[in-house]
């Protein structure tokens, strides 16, 4: 049997069409991948950001609830709060800022920033709860596991300049 006949029986022809067909198929596959991969990665990234933000807002709700309880209980009361802002596989939490300096503009707010998004503000209202860090500055955190101590303190001064005398606020600190 000749070599040409053996090639024909196996389904191979002795022509140059195979040389043209394979690169064309590879080009088509590469074009399809170039179109679908960015869209797929964009969808995964958006899902990951939303999952991280949902988890973070849930943790912030726990802190807000505890801070309100401590504040309404009055000076001398405290609580410990487990705070675990999770990061995603493609997205992380850049910063979480609790309160402001006593009497500052953001004293009753929690701000957070997730990678790829603008900073967002969660107000702590009903009642308005002024918060500050242990050193008189806002408490700043990133991703990780924390235990936060929230303590209601009498400031001894009129922090918000409303003329109603000494104000109380919630002092937040990290327990090592």
Image: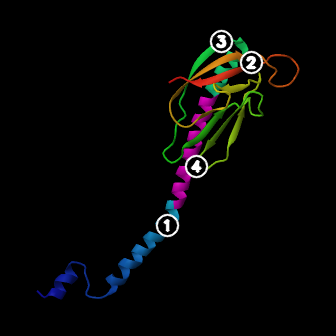
Mark 3 = which residue? Answer: 77
> In front of the other: label 3 or label 1?
3
Mark 2 = which residue? Answer: 155
Q: How many marks?
A: 4
Q: CA distance from mark 3 to mark 1?
A: 59 Å
Q: Which numbered marker is on residue 46?
A: 4
Q: How is the image coloured?
A: rainbow
Mark 2 and mark 3 residues within 8 Å of each other at the beta carbon: no
Residue beneath the point at 65% across and 35% down: 97
Q: Position of residue 171 (x, y in %)?
A: 66, 22
Q: Secondary structure at mark 2?
A: loop
Segment colored magenta: 38-60
Relative placement, left or right, of 135 versus 82 is: right
Q: Position of residue 1 (x, y in %)?
A: 11, 86
> In front of the other: label 4 or label 2?
2
Point out the tag, 4 or 1, that comes first from the N-terminus: 1
């Amino acid at each position: 049997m000749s070599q040409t006949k053996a090639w024909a029986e196996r389904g191979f022809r002795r022509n140059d069409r195979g040389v043209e067909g394979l690169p064309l198929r590879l080009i088509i596959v590469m074009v399809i991948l170039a179109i679908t991969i960015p869209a797929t990665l964009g969808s995964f990234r958006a899902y990951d950001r939303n999952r991280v933000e949902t988890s973070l807002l849930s943790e912030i709700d726990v802190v807000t609830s505890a801070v309100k309880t401590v504040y309404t209980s009055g000076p001398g009361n405290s609580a410990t709060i487990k705070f675990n802002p999770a990061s995603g596989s493609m997205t992380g939490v850049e910063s979480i800022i609790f309160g402001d300096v006593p009497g500052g503009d953001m004293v009753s707010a929690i701000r957070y920033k997730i990678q790829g998004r603008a900073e967002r503000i969660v107000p702590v209202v009903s009642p308005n709860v002024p918060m500050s860090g242990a050193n008189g500055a806002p408490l700043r955190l990133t991703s990780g596991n924390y235990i936060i101590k929230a303590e209601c303190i009498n400031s001894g001064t009129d922090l918000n300049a409303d003329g109603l005398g000494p104000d109380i606020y919630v002092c937040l600190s990290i327990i090592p």
